[in-house]
Image (cartoon, rainbow, N blue to C red):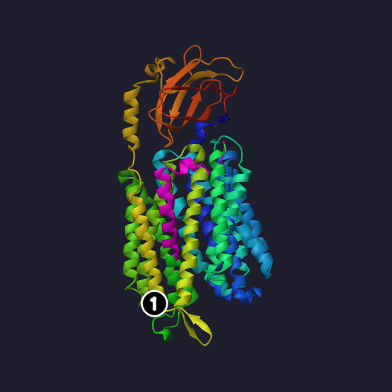
Amino acid sequence: MTHTTTDQPTRGASGALVPVLAFAGIVVAVMQTLLVPVIKDLPQLLGTAPSNATWVLTSTLLSGAVATPIMGRLGDLYGKRRMLILSLAVMVVGALVSALTSQLLTMIVGRTLQGFAMGAIPLGIGLMRDMLPREKLGSAMALMSSSIGVGGGLALPAAALVAQHMNWHALFYGAAGLGVLSIALTLLVVPESPMRAEGSFDVVGALGLSTGLVLLLLPITKGSDWGWSSGTTLGLFAASVAVLLLWGVFELRHSAPLVDLRTTARPAVLFTNLASIMVGVSFYVVSLVLPQLLQLPKATGYGLGQSMVAAGLLVAPLGLTMMFTAPVYARLSAKYGPKTTLILGLLIIAIGYGAGLGLMSAPWQSLVIAVVLGAGIGLAYSSLPALIVGAVPASETGAANGLNTLMRSIGTSVSSAVIGMVLANTANNVGGVEIPTMHGFRVSFLIATGAVAVGLVLALFLPKRSLPAAEAAQHTQLRASSEEDAALVTAEEVLRGFRGRVLSAQGVPVARAKVTLIDRRGRQAGATLSGDDGTYALAVPAEGAYVLAAMAVGHGPLASSATHAGDERAVDLDLSLPGETVSA
């Protein structure tokens, strides 16, 4: 077993930690939204066919989907701050490559590198879990999770303004500058997390997942160009199913998998991830429909005749409202739990899309839709990481949130493909130009409403929330009124739990070392003091993954991950403390 040294005082992180990590999330969203104002002009700007120009967007999507779970796992193993900086650095290189070229292939390479920034979201959430006290964690994770929407909402009008008045390459220079600023702030403010997962990096698992995702997302994003019933599209879908099945079998047999599928199969994780796909679909529909409706000329009879910048400003409240819902979410979640806030968010999204079916005839109505949908999506997005973090061991936070972010990306990819197909098939051809119709916009909103309904059903299947932190603490106090009383439990008396000896780096028993048992929700499940011969024993309340934290005067603290099957037996686990006290 690989032990992890940790220094508890690092949890007293700077007050700037949350804003700096949320800013990294906003930078990622800016990178994603960067080219939206110039999508229709890309074929001319790159001197290529429209079907080739879409690879500039598809490449970022594919690399982001691949990088998200991989960077999450690497963060768990080797340090989340380190991997966050690496993700942002790769994005900066990609932005500079794109800024210096008008060649299609070079641009695709640059955009592929930019996609690696997607790993910043799960890494940021993981850092928050490791660094922040529980009372601040809910609102912090909510802000980090909704930063994608916030950045997207703010980037649309800004990118439109730049595209309208400057060379379009300036968009990439701006993104590179934001990336450098984010790296600098992270280096200055964010300490490295002390938490480390066990094992090594699963290279075969990473290659298998990457291949399976590319084979799945390629036909989703290019199906309308290739034909949904074409041999290429169907062949790639079949290949993705085969590869992902083989990957799943391999991961289940691997001792240190890239993605712990057994954890992923838990109802709390499984239904959260499936609901995330639906939230991703609902978020992207409004981002695709509203800007087009606003910019279509009034001569169409339904277009609202707004400029590119005005349309961006009218859609911007979508992201801003998401940001303002983060503190509201924290209060609601503390009282009712993240499952309830997810359901509430989905209900608000459904109301927004339902109202949107009849509110498409004036710019102010688009503003109302953006605000309502922003509030609902903000609540839903904020709930997702809390549900995941509450269901997985601390050492798997990065990888699990990476997988959840991936599910949202798959939702946006499916949404992009389906809505693109709907708008194309319902468009009118006017002088050789395809003009989206009001019928197409309404069908898109109906699809989004259907996705939200499916998400609601999935959310209802989520397990009920566990005891709030205060109640859990009271139960813990009842089990052991003091550390001294708990220390009276001998190793022989513990039938279901962990027992062993606390040793120094030289193998000498350490007396009166404090040993704390932390459950997968980050809550204390028990505490004791080691005996004169270094022995300790702690009972476990249930099966699952735990962290045993040990500290003693004159020694560095230690955190060691361990799993208990929940049966009537004691797991023997010696805890070896580092020789020197680690300074805060």
Check the image and name the residue furthest to the top. Answer: 532
Whether residue 458 can be seen here: yes
Instruction: Residue 66 in the image: state x and y as whole percent.
Output: 58, 53
Q: Nearer the viewer, residue 516 or 178?
A: 516
Q: Nearer the viewer, residue 539 or 322?
A: 539
Q: Nearer the viewer, residue 140 or 280?
A: 280
Other-residue count near label 1 (Cα within 10 Å), few / some / many at <14 / 14–19 / ≥20: few
Is 375 situated left or right of 125 in this image? left
Instruction: Residue 478 in the image: state x and y as whole percent.
Output: 31, 24
Q: Is residue 204 above or below residue 518?
A: below
Residue numbers of the magenta segment = 255-284
Is 136 situated left or right of 49 in this image? left
Instruction: Residue 211 in the image: state x and y as whole percent.
Output: 60, 54
Look at the image and say whether residue 429 sits in the magenta stretch: no
Q: Is residue 487 above or below residue 239?
A: above
Residue at image location 50% in from the left, 19% down from the top? 500
Q: Quadrant of residue 454?
A: bottom left
Look at the image and say whether residue 276 sits in the magenta stretch: yes
Q: Secondary structure at mark 1?
A: helix
Instruction: Residue 133 in the image: state x and y as whole percent.
Output: 43, 38
Q: Which residue is mark 1?
A: 439
Predominant SS of the magenta segment: helix
Residue at image location 32% in from the left, 49% down from the top? 340
Q: Quadrant of residue 472?
A: top left
Q: Is residue 2 above or below residue 574?
A: below
What residue type is disc 1 on? His
